[in-house]
Image (cartoon, rainbow, N blue to C red):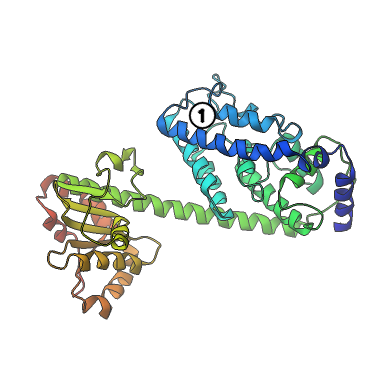
Amino acid sequence: MSHNLQSIIQRYKADEETVYNTWFVNNEERLKAFRSIRRGVLDVIRDIKNGSFGNDFKGSSLEFVLSCITEQKQVFMGASHPFYWKPKLRIPDIYENESNKTAFGEFLEKCLNATREEQIIKEIILLDQRKIKGLGPAVASILYFLHPTIIPPCNTAIVNGFNRLFKDKIRLGSWQEYLRMRKVIIQTNSSFSADMSNDLGAFAGLLFDIGVNKTDIGDLQILSEKDREKIARQLKKRHKEVADEQKQNNLHTEMQYHLLKIGESLNYDVISASNDRSRCHEGDSFSFISLSQFPKIDVDADTFKTITLIDVVWFESGTNRIAGAFEVEKSTSIYSGILRLKDLYYSFTTNPPSLFLIIPDNREKEVVLQLSRPAIQNGGVQIRYILFSELRQNCDAICKFGENKEILKKISKTVD
């Protein structure tokens, strides 16, 4: 089987009219496209952020990106069609729906800045979970120009070629199906590394030529049922991991929001961690109740950076005096949060702020164990903890009846 595929690859590379020779190799315009498209994606992200993206594909920065891609001819000839605004179908739903537009911009930004394969796959799975109408694996053709060794392009001809070569039934338009196809492409391309390229455009070009009937493959059979089942299991496991992680992130965001809301109602100035200020909970943005920047405090630069990463900090109104600090823990190491709170405590030993861990109910025993460590007990640091369920259930009551941070002692616990 591998010998037969190898002979197909060799014919594909030897034929002067295949995609391999007319587009992939010795093509300066192709290399220039990578630079242009990357700059164009940055423009799309910027326009979505500042609200100038518009409500139509035509005239948008996204149109420029897709124009650069379709200029590549052959493999990408129809790449722009899925992004045309179709008013009757309301697709793709990234022009009129602001939430979807923002999600698309964040997706592009995270993929652009990603350095590892798992980061990109995670963002694809999360985007798929949003079920944005009309926004499917056609986006992979954009991602290919950002990460050509990780993401193969996707269109009708490539999918048709894949189904013929691997005797499969991949459906066009499904991200889950695309990820399954991608997995097989990566594995097969790796098996023929001496004949192909790390750049997946070469293998995608082979699939394209097969899909448009330029390259004949006969009765070649490459994947066994055992191989297919293994790939399906791997993808299912990854989807579950991403879904579980997203659930944890949502809980983390919810707890941060409760703390910000309570702090504001008690007349403290509040702020979230520097990398969380763009978050929102059920449509309520952190930025509307949070300080725009962390007040200057009298500590060294490294300690200041550590403190700004604490999940939520309360300041005495109009000052830089820290009244309370909160670390929300979920699936990560609880001890790392304790260390950040300790750094804060030792920076203000004469007037230390109140310190709290916010924890899932099922991790209480673990927290008690960590807070019982001699390094904590003998250091004079008092850290109280609040269960997720207690914070959620009592948030509104505290906002209504609380006068200051002392009210938190009603729902928090400590280790003696």
Q: Residues within 10 Å of mark 1 (few under 14, many from 20)?
A: many
- Residue 81 vs 154, above or below: the answer is above
Question: Residue 340's spot in the image, x, y percent?
Answer: 30, 64
Say which quadrant the C terminus sits in. Answer: bottom left
Q: Amino acid at mark 1?
A: Asp
Q: Which residue is mark 1?
A: 93
> Looking at the image, which is closer to me, 292 or 163?
292
Corner quadrant of residue 305: bottom left
Location of the N terminus by quadrant is bottom right
Q: In the drawing, does residue 324 fall left or right of residue 189?
A: left
What residue do we see at 22% from left, 77% from top?
A: 377
Question: What is the x, y in percent for residue 395?
Answer: 21, 49
Would residue 390 appear left or right of 280 to someone viewing this image?
left
Residue occupying the point 50% across, 42% down: 109
Name the residue located 85 percent from the left edge and 46 percent from the top edge.
13
In the picture provided, is 123 more to the left or to the right than 311?
Answer: right
Residue 138 visible: yes
Among the 4 quarters of the image, the one containing residue 194: bottom right
Left or right of residue 264: residue 226:
right
Tell me the residue at 49%/40% (across/down). Answer: 130
Q: Residue furthest top?
A: 88
Viewer can see residue 139: no
Residue 98 place in picture, x, y as percent: 43, 30
